[in-house]
Image (spheres, grey):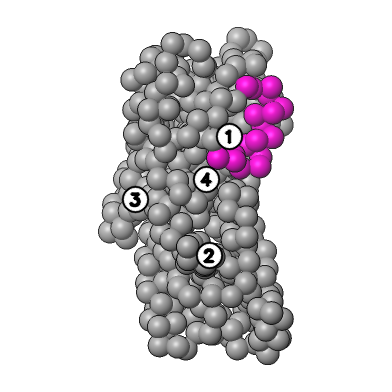
Amino acid sequence: MTAPNPPAEYAAAIERTAVREHITVAQAAAEQHRLVDAIQQILGSDEIFTEDYGQERSLATGAFGSGGRPVATAKVESALARYFGTGDAVLVPGAGTGAIRGVLSSVPPRGRVVVHSALPYKTTAAALERMALETVPVDFNDLGAVRSAVQHGLVDALYVQHVPHQLGDVYELADVIAVGRESGGDGLLVLVDDNYAAMRSPRIGVQCGADGSALSLFKLLARSNIGCVLGSGRVTSAVRRDLSSAGSQVQGADAMDALRSLVYAPVALALQNAVVVEAAAEINRLAGAGQLPYVRCAIPSQLAMRAIGLVFDAPIAEPFLRSAWRNGSPSRSVGEEARYDVVPLFTYLAGTFLKSAPGIERYVVRINPLRGGTETIVRVLEAALEDAKLRADAAAASV
């Protein structure tokens, strides 16, 4: 039996993990134009400058006296619904987490929800628990298991995270939704967490047949922590009901800022995706030439968010990150990929990935280019590796 080789094993596992299809820069430009076209059809002329506050009574969705929405917010929601080709859109406070709570509110009280057997994101787990929803864990990499779980009307909803949860996830969103629809019937709610996928992937959940999609506009360059729930009235009516008070709603100025910011997101994210591929290739070239000590390889990957997986030959990930933070990388992010996150970020893996592969935190880190390019990433990487304190810490970690 060969001796275990953690760096090789982790690299192979990252390579096996699915990378969602990402649109190209040219496709992103076309998406920008399509979004602006939808905005023009709803907010053409000087309406594009409307930024009101408070509840317009004519926009109430409930009985008389149930409140309403700011006019600008309603217009932005209509533009988003048109762009994504869905029945309705609701802006919610709380960014991606708020949107996830919103789609889950459409599940009947104490309902049964089929979820991936991997660990859910921490705030998703909290929402499921606080709503007293019973989870039915199923391996989404096994479509037969998904089919069996949703048959016979014994569950209320199928909840899918668009991006991978853990190392080794290979399921495709459209396939899981199709099986749920085919086997669960019209009564089954199909809900999707599209965070880190919206404006990157060619199609999100509602465009693949889901009843509802949850996404963060804060991660798509909005200035405020706003989320969005897209879907049929079956999903959005529950969100509107729960957020009917003025203090729970997104005001017009923030809604308009989020929409204007969203226009720039597709091209920015397509450029980021291109840098992930280009920078990984350059790091591998330099490592192969012996110019990057400790670096085994760089892998363009989808470790929840799109990023470079940097694998070391020695267990030096923690001292390396501390060195990177001394040499040009921020040590924190604002939700990661918010408009405030500009400089390339060297950081640890997402929590669900760390928990799914104990020990990986010693050998693998993540590099998110954000708005930066390959030259910037390599400069920070080289400086971090040349740091005298890192060399001492690495020597101690290798003993």
Image side of residue 123 versus residue 29, left or right = right
At mark 4, the secondary structure is: loop
Assess whether mark 4 and mark 1 are in contact (beta carbons under 8 angstroms).
Answer: no
Q: Position of residue 356 (x, y in %)?
A: 58, 49
Quadrant position of the C terminus in the picture: bottom right
Viewer-proximal residue, 91 or 253? 91
Total labels: the figure holds 4
Disc number lying in front (4 or 2): 2
* Residues at marks 3 and 4 touching, judged by CB atoms closer than 8 Å: no
| Residue contact at pointers 2 and 1, CB within 8 angstroms | no
Question: Which type of secondary structure does the marked residue at label 1 adopt?
Answer: helix
Q: Is residue 370 above or below residue 335?
A: below
Q: Quadrant of residue 67?
A: top right
Q: Earlier in the sequence, mark 2 or mark 3?
A: 2
Q: Which residue is mark 1?
A: 100
Q: CA distance from mark 3 to mark 4?
A: 16 Å
Of callouts 3 and 1, the N-terminal one: 3
Q: Which numbered mark, 3 or 4, is in the foreground of this view?
A: 4
Residue at x 45%, y 46% (from the top left corner): 169
Mark 1 Cα-neighbour bin, 10 Å: few <14, some 14–19, many ≥20: many
What is the x, y in percent for residue 373? Answer: 45, 74
For the residue carrying disc 2, how many other residues have a C-alpha within 10 Å: few (<14), some (14-19), or many (20+)? few
Q: Amino acid at mark 1?
A: Ile
Which of the two residues, 243 or 363, is positioned nearer the viewer here? 363
Q: Which residue is mark 4?
A: 165
Indicate which disc, 4 or 2, sits on the residue closer to the N terminus.
2
Residue at the spot of label 2: 4
Magenta region, residue range: 118-134
Residue 321 x, y percent position in the rendering: 64, 72
Looking at the rendered structure, the kind of residue marked 3 is Glu
Separation (CA) of disc 4 from disc 2: 25 Å
